[in-house]
Amino acid sequence: MLSIDQDGTGGGDAYREALGQRIATAADRFPTRAAAADAAGLTAEQLRKWIRGEAKASAEGLRGLAAGAGVDFGWLVTGGSGVAGRTLDEATVRTVLTTVLQVMQESDLEAANPAKFADLVISLHHYVQQQSGRADGLADLGNVIRLASRR
């Protein structure tokens, strides 16, 4: 079983303490700590040890916790570039896709290529999330949508 620590070797008390804080943040997104432990494939006591930095966390368990909590796995493991909550939100994805497709149909546009289309949707998704989930004015992004499309 792979365990996650600062340098990948299993050492690092400061890393474990910071990781424990991120684990607690993720666990708080569940109705109970028992539910969070279950998502990570742990007992509640094992989860408490992870949070306190007293036990090494496994990559498999962290992945389950991140997925269940809806947080970015990279953020959970490293505390780096990913941000808690920077995962795709189903309602936001629906709003963004609906808007993109509507603008494309109204403008007689096609996706330039699948990769650019995916990048556009993800970028717009993160934009909407930064706007506190409001999709107001998303239709005004027609010029951005057109840049990622072709006639």
Image (spheres, helix red, strand yellow):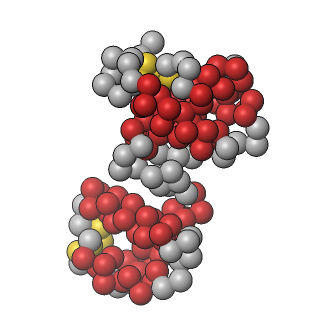
At a point 46% along the width and 80% down the height, the residue shown is 138
In this rendering, the count of numbered labels is: 0
Coordinates of residue 35 in the picture (x, y in percent)? 73, 33
Q: Residue at x 70, y 20 (%)?
A: 45
In the shown orientation, is residue 149 left or right of residue 29? left
Q: Looking at the image, which is closer to me, 48 or 109?
A: 48
Name the spot of residue 75 as percent of width and height, x first.
43, 44
Q: Position of residue 60 (x, y in %)?
A: 49, 23
Locate the N terminus and report the quarter of the image it occupies: top left
Q: Nearer the viewer, residue 118 or 51?
A: 51
Which quadrant holds residue 133?
bottom right
Front in this rendered view, residue 42 or 49? 49
Would you say residue 97 is visible in this rendering?
A: no
Q: Classify residue 146 by image quadrant.
A: bottom left
110 to 119, vertically: above or below: below
Question: Does 2 appear above or below 105?
Answer: above
At 44% from the left and 25% from the top, the residue drawn is 13
Q: Quadrant of the C terminus?
A: bottom left
Which residue is the extreme one toward the top?
1
Residue 107 placement, left or right of 135? left
Q: Position of residue 18 (x, y in %)?
A: 48, 37
Q: Residue at x 45, y 65 (%)?
A: 125
Up the image or down, 87 lies above or below 73; here it is below
* Outermost residue toward the front in this view: 14
